[in-house]
Image (tube, grey):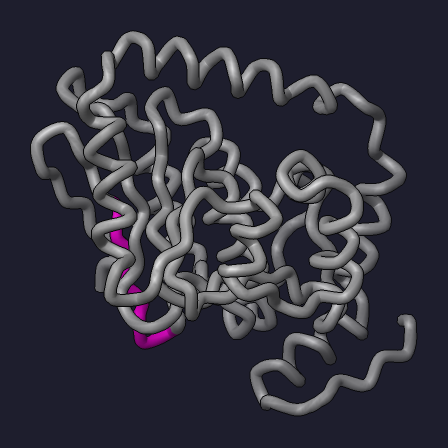
Amino acid sequence: MATIRIEQSGPVRTVVLTRGDKRNALNAEMLEALLGAFRAPPAPSDRVTVIRAEGPVFCSGIDLRERLEKPAAAGESPIEVVLHAIETYPLPVVAVVQGDAIAGGNELALHCDFVVAASTARFGMSLAQIGLAPTWFLTKKLMEIAGPVWAREMLLLGDPLPATRMHQLNLIARVAPPEGLEAAASAIIDRLAANAPLSLRAMKAMMVRQMAFRDGIAHADATALVEAARRSADAREGMQARLEKRRPVFHGQ
C-alpha cells in the first residue's frame, strides 16, 4: 500500500501522507517515498509544494513499532535526510496541519517554509518522554525557529503546545478554526503560485544558505550522546511504554 500520494493542480503539487490509520507514523517506506518526492527537481511549471495528511493526525513521528523491531543504524538518520531535502527544496513548501504534529511530525511541519494549522492541532517533541533525542541538525532547526527559550520548552519538557500558542510565539505562519483551515491555507498557496518563479527560487536559495551557518560547528560529542540515548535500554522501555499507553520506568541505562 502506498504511503504517500502526489497530486498536481496547475502550479501546485501536493504530497499527501496516506497512513492515516497509523497516525501517519513515518516508517522506512514512507521516508523513502518522501525523499524521492523532494529530491526530484520540480517541474518547470511548478510554483509551490504542499504537504497534507489523511486522517485526524498530521504525523505522530517515527513508527515506534518498526523502530523497536529494526533499530536505526548509527550515523545520519533517515528522517534527517528527508527533512533536509524538504528544507532545501528549490520552491516554497507549505504544510497544512489538520491534526497533531508530534516529534518527527513536528519537525516535518517546521522544516516547511509555511505552516498553516487548525486551532485544534498540537505540536510537540516528546522524545525525552520515551528516552530518545533529536540529532544535531534537528535540534538546530528548533533553535532557529523557536529560539533557546521555547526550544527548551519543547525539547526538555516534551509536552505538546496548542497551535494557537505556536502562532502566538511566531513559530507557525497561520492558525485557523478547523472549518477555516482550507481557506487559510489557500490564501498562502494561491499567493505563492501567483508569484514570479525565478524570484521564488532565488529567495529560497538565499534563505537556505544563510540559515546554514551553524552546520560547521563541531558536534561529534553531542552526536555520541544522541546515539547513546537511541541505543539505551531506556529508549526501548520508553517506546514500548508509549505503544502500551503506560508510564515508562527509566533507569538511566
Seen at 85% across and 42% down, the residue is 222
Q: Nearer the viewer, residue 236 or 128?
A: 128
Above/below status of 133 relative to 75: below
User: In the shown orientation, is residue 238 left or right of residue 11?
Assistant: right
Is residue 17 shown in magenta? yes
Q: Indicate the quadrant where residue 40 lies.
A: top left
The image shows residue 189, relative to residue 18, as above or below, that is above
Task: Please identify the quadrant where the C terminus is shown.
Answer: bottom right
Q: Is residue 62 visible?
A: no
* 88 with respect to 221 (left or right): left
Write the residue at 84% across / 34% down: 220
How far across and down, in percent of the image, does residue 189 sit?
25, 36
Identify the image quadrant of residue 69. bottom right
Give me the residue at 44% from left, 60% from top.
27
Left-right relation of 248 to 25: right
Residue found farthest to the left: 10
Q: Is residue 219 above or below residue 163?
A: above
* Quadrant of the frame with the N terminus: bottom left
Say left or right for 11 vs 245. left
Q: Start and end of the magenta stretch?
A: 15-22
| Residue 185 place in picture, x, y as percent | 28, 46
Q: Which residue is pictured at 73% across the width and 40% down the height?
A: 147
Work out whether residue 94 or residue 90 is closer to the camera in this orientation and state it: 94
* Residue 158 x %, y %: 71, 66
Q: Is residue 61 magenta?
A: no
